[in-house]
Image (cartoon, grey):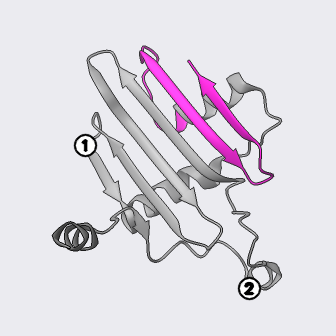
Amino acid sequence: MILSLLLFACGDNDEVENPPQNATDEDQQQGTENDTNTDYGFTEFDLDADYQDTNDALDVDYEHENNDKIEASYRDKAQEINLTGDAALEELDSIFSSFTFDENTPDEEILNTVTEAFNVPKDAKNIELDILFNGGMEKEYRR
């Protein structure tokens, strides 16, 4: 009983309460309950990078679930960014909105676009990117 109260009290602070209003009214009216397409071209985005002197230096997580629940977090130790929920999505929205790639874009082009957008140093030791595109294809990118 105490454990369940602790879990409930902690909550999930990555949950977004007020997502950006990028979609037009017409787009929203055309959506269906099972439609998880987003304006970004993907429903899940997970980026992790280790820098030369710092493990877990960058951690970006975004998930837009079927029930329109959105979770987001953005942590960048080098830039002293530690955002979750609405604050994270507000920061990520401008970055994600600039992406023009899709599941057919060459892997290296996607990695270059993402690492440039998040200012990942050229000498980063380990970069892992997982994206679930709107069409349902999940792809993993590594460098």
- Numbered label attached to residue 25: 2
Q: Quadrant of the N terminus?
A: bottom left
**What element does badge 1 sit on?**
loop
**What element does badge 2 sit on?**
helix
First to last magenta residue range: 116-143
Closer-to-camera residue (99/12): 12
The first of marks 1 and 2 along the sequence is: 2
Q: For residue 84, what is the image quadrant?
A: bottom left
Closer-to-camera residue (122/84): 84
Q: For residue 32, what is the image quadrant?
A: bottom right
Whether 61 is drawn above or below 123: the answer is: below
Quick check: is 56 in the magenta stretch? no
Q: CA distance from mark 1 to mark 2?
A: 36 Å
Which residue position is annotated with label 1?
A: 80
Residue at 69% x, 74% y is 23
Whether 4 is drawn above or below 79: the answer is: below
* x, y percent for residue 6: 19, 68
* x, y percent for residue 70: 52, 66
Residue at 32% x, 31% y is 57
* x, y percent for residue 123: 42, 13
Q: Quadrant of the C terminus?
A: top right
Q: Relative to 117, is 83 on the left or the right?
A: left
Q: Relative to 132, is 46 on the left or the right?
A: left
Closer-to-camera residue (104/118): 104
* x, y percent for residue 66: 65, 68
Whether 94 is drawn above or below 33: the answer is: above
